[in-house]
DNA sequence: AGCACGCCGACT
DNA sequence: GTCGGCGTGCTC
């Protein structure tokens, strides 16, 4: 039967192209095919098939069916959904799920081993003799391994292969990952609270699996025994799950308009058949997404490990998403302690063959657990049974280039499409997730206490208006005393300051000149170690000048304010005999060195750590007992609508680093505004209070806690466009309801180029409808004068 | 993504 | 006069 195939191509194209299917080839939706496009041949995915209409067709033909597992229906629907929600061309969305091996990866290093062929070389040399002596045992080695062991170069080995003295044998590829054993460790190590939470969590499997699965291809799935709970355990009913949401908190049913906003609801008003299951999911069907909220040190990880174990027992696959930085050896070891082996990992750094093998193993179901960064969300799982999003509040889940998406939200969507539960884990959830939980869209499980009877650190404020540091110093007397006491006990102290470099502002004390970035409106930050002035906004760097560039005065450059480098200087003077390390993202020596240093700190090979937000995430420091926050007020005034939330999360996380080991911890917080709601909530240890206040405040301001808010970020390209810029600012001064205007300083640098161009960056979590809305609004507004184009860029990212 | 076409600045 | 910059548009 002659067919035409609609093939979606992984390029920035929004529509599938039609191709003729040659006789003898039968294609199904989801198949990966090769097709001609212009002058070249590329891979695409069959998005639809139709009987070829009678009569001749001038369509170009499909050139072949590629030997790649077809894209499952849920994955295809995820691509469609993502494209529509993020305003990205469908092809771009597809590209994320279809990273085919490029030629180099496919042909590259088919791993070969060598072993002795038992034949002497025709021309023996000293190097050859060494190599053959090592190979004489007859064992198979990698080429590199042999060369290294024999102390010869690779070309010697190659020469011997060519000569016939060594024979090359293909190596059986090592398995991409060993099978995790869900019962490697008994659950006896869990606390009562953890067991209870794990039980509640596992109840979600029953709600998840009982929902109808839509599998178009009629594959015989791996779903084994979906109905029988594991280990004879009686699954909790869905009511138990819903109970996690306090009844008095439940809000009235959402109106249709309210439906707009966060995933999993698609943008309103554009419903199509694909959206239907997602839409209805919000209206009282079993909760499938669960917020697992536990204070730092409560053992959330162990709890969701039990869910992973349950998933594996049922023969389905689990995906654990983590922010890239959290993918540490430490975490993988914890996994290994529970499951016997390290999990398969996936992140942007995995390339070439390994990447492809892992993809394939995920597609066949051979790999049962993947731990990965956000891109792992698009792996072609055969039978996905669980998604965990660890540290769900992390902004690293936002993809900001190419297709803009939030991996946490897409995880929720994929969970719906795959019919599997999704666990969002965090000690400090994002506002929108908290609201979703409050409204009953997500379940909520809370671990209010630390594991193993450990106490949360006491948090005390140091009021900087009263306890002033010495002139030119930044550690207040109580802070100095506390650090001194801690290190005297052999304990570790962390001084936290979220500012890289030496000083955030440099000025000339002779003429008052302030060093400013030539591209941005920001001050240049002195980096004393690198002897440079650096813009933290765009990366612009200049050598630190000897004399003032403005008035020429020597020795008048004055650093204003502290960065971590300056704190290190102060600490070195105060504690000359202590081991001090500065950890920030610009750590000299790169990520690998940084990783090593983090391990070393965790092992206790350091007394005082001075760090930026980097130390607040990912790593555990078991020897740490004192956390000193040097300026808790940074970030509270940033103008970012999420400023309060971000600051609270960061401070909560960083103070929570203290006392995770044997000894109890405490935290000191230097602040000028101890009564600020964020600081007060932190000090009281009542996270609830922060969330309640923040949500109430947004509601009072007419800004829904999530959904329906957009911000216009206005940026002008050049200084001579300042006038036009002013006009545009005036124009947006009266924005539509729910639209917030941010200044040009917040505009990402990428948007500040293009000469006669004027851009409005719209950040929104409303998806499509806000775009047409704003377009109408702009059309009705007066146009800027001169040769100025106005473009609207919609960044459909939830940023509120 | 690639590749063509097309329109303005500095050079063998 | 061309070479070459990248902006814009197209690929079933």
Image (spheres, coloured by chain):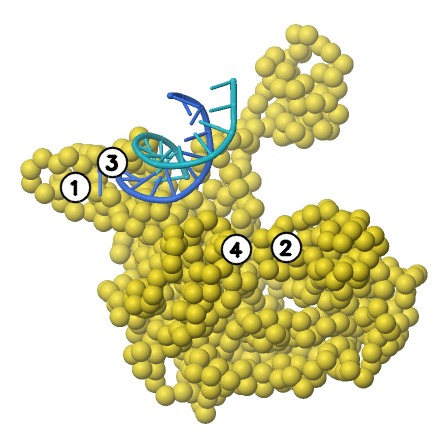
Chain colours: A yellow, B cyan, C blue
Mark 4 or mark 1: whose residue is earlier in sequence: 1
Task: Report, in whole angstroms, how far the alpha carbon at label 3 lies from the one at label 1.
Answer: 11 Å
Q: Is residue A258 left or right of residue A745?
A: left
Instruction: Tell me whether marks 1 and 2 sit on the same chain.
Output: yes
Give the secondary structure at mark 3: loop
Mark 3 or mark 2: whose residue is earlier in sequence: 3
- The nearer-to-camera label among 4 and 1 is 4
Task: Report, in whole angstroms, how far the alpha carbon at label 4 lies from the one at label 2.
Answer: 14 Å
Q: Give me the residue at 62% from left, 60% from top.
A: A522
Q: Quadrant of residue A650?
A: bottom right
Mark 4 or mark 2: whose residue is earlier in sequence: 2
| CB contact under 8 Å: marks 4 and 3 | no
Crowding around mark 1 (Cα neighbors within 10 Å: few <14, some 14 to 19, many 20+) is some
Is A115 drawn above or below residue A483 in the view shown?
Answer: above
Mark 3 or mark 1: whose residue is earlier in sequence: 1
Crowding around mark 4 (Cα neighbors within 10 Å: few <14, some 14 to 19, many 20+) is few
Instruction: Tell me whether marks 4 and 2 sit on the same chain.
Output: yes
| Residue with the mark numbered 1 | A3
| CB contact under 8 Å: marks 4 and 1 | no
Q: Give me the residue at 30% from left, 50% from top.
A: A14
| Residue with the mark numbered 4 | A719
Instruction: Tell me whether marks 4 and 3 sit on the same chain.
Output: yes
| Residue with the mark numbered 2 | A517
Residue A62: image tag:
3
Give the secondary structure at mark 4: helix
Say which chain tag 4 marks: A
Q: Position of residue A577 (x, y in %)?
A: 93, 61
Say which chain tag 2 marks: A
């Amino acid at each position: 039967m002659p067919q035409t195939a609609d093939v979606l191509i992984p390029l920035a194209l929004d529509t599938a192209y039609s191709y003729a299917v040659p006789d003898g080839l039968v294609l199904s939706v989801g198949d990966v095919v090769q097709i001609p496009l212009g002058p070249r041949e590329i891979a695409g995915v069959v998005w639809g098939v139709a009987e070829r209409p009678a009569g001749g067709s001038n369509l170009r033909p499909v050139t072949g069916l590629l030997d790649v597992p077809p894209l499952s229906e849920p994955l295809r629907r995820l691509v469609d959904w993502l494209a529509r929600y993020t305003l990205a061309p469908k092809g771009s969305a597809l590209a994320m799920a279809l990273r085919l091996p490029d030629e180099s990866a496919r042909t590259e290093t088919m791993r070969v081993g060598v072993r002795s062929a038992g034949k002497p070389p025709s021309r023996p040399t000293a190097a050859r003799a060494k190599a053959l002596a090592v190979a004489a045992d007859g064992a198979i080695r990698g080429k590199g391994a042999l060369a290294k062991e024999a102390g010869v170069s690779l070309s010697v080995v190659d020469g011997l292969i060519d000569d016939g003295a060594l024979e090359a044998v293909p190596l059986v590829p090592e398995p991409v990952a060993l099978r995790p054993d869900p019962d490697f460790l008994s659950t006896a190590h869990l606390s009562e609270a953890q067991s209870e939470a794990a039980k509640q969590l596992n109840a979600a499997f029953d709600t998840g699996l009982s929902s109808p699965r839509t599998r178009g291809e009629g594959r015989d799935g791996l779903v084994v025994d979906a109905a029988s709970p594991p280990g004879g355990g009686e699954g909790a009913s869905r009511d138990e799950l819903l109970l996690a949401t306090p009844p008095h908190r439940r809000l009235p049913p959402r109106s249709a308009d309210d439906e707009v906003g966060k995933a999993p609801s698609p943008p309103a008003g554009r419903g199509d058949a694909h959206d239907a299951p997602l839409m209805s999911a919000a209206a009282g069907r079993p909760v499938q997404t669960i917020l697992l909220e536990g204070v730092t040190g409560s053992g959330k990880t162990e709890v969701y490990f039990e869910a992973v174990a349950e998933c594996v027992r049922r023969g389905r696959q689990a995906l654990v998403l983590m922010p890239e930085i959290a993918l540490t050896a430490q975490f993988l070891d914890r996994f290994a302690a529970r499951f016997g082996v390290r999990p398969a990992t996936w992140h942007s750094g995995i390339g070439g063959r390994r990447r492809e093998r892992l993809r394939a193993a995920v597609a066949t179901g051979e790999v049962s657990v993947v731990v990965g960064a956000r891109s792992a969300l698009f792996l072609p799982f055969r039978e996905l049974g669980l998604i965990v999003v660890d540290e769900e509040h992390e902004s690293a889940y936002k993809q900001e280039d190419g297709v803009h998406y939030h991996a946490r939200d897409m995880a929720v969507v994929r969970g719906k499409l795959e019919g599997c539960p999704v666990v969002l884990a965090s000690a400090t959830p994002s506002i929108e997730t908290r609201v979703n939980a409050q409204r009953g869209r997500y379940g909520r499980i809370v671990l209010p206490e630390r594991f193993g009877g450990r106490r949360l650190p006491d948090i005390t404020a140091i009021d900087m208006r009263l306890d002033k540091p010495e002139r030119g110093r930044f550690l207040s007397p109580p802070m100095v005393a506390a650090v001194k006491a801690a290190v005297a006990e052999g304990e570790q102290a962390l001084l936290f300051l979220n500012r890289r470099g030496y000083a955030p502002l440099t000025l000339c004390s002779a003429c008052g000149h302030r060093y400013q970035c030539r591209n941005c409106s920001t001050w240049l930050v002195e980096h004393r170690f690198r002897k440079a002035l650096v813009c933290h906004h765009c990366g612009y760097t200049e050598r630190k000048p000897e004399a003032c560039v403005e008035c020429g005065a020597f020795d008048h450059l004055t650093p204003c304010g502290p960065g971590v480098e300056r704190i290190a200087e102060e600490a070195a003077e105060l504690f000359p005999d202590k081991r001090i390390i500065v950890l920030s993202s610009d750590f000299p020596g790169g990520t690998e060195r940084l990783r090593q240093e983090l391990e070393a700190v965790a092992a206790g090979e350091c007394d005082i750590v001075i760090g930026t937000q980097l130390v607040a995430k990912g790593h555990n420091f078991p020897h740490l007992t004192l956390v000193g926050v040097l300026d808790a007020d940074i970030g509270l005034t940033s103008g970012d609508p999420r400023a309060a939330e971000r600051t609270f999360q960061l401070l909560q996380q960083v103070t929570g680093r203290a006392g995770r080991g044997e000894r109890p911890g405490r935290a000191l917080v230097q602040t000028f505004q101890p009564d600020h709601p964020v600081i007060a909530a932190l000090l009281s240890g009542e996270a609830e209070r922060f969330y309640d206040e923040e949500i109430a405040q947004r509601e009072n301001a007419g800004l829904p806690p999530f959904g329906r808010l957009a911000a216009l970020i206005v940026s002008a390209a050049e200084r001579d466009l300042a006038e036009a810029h002013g006009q545009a600012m005036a124009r947006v001064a009266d924005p539509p309801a729910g639209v917030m205007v941010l200044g040009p300083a917040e505009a990402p640098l990428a948007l500040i180029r293009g000469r006669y161009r004027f851009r409005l960056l719209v950040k929104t979590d409303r998806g499509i409808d806000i775009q047409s809305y704003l377009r109408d609004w702009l059309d009705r507004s007066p146009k800027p004068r001169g040769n100025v184009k106005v473009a609207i860029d919609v960044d459909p990212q939830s940023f509120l």
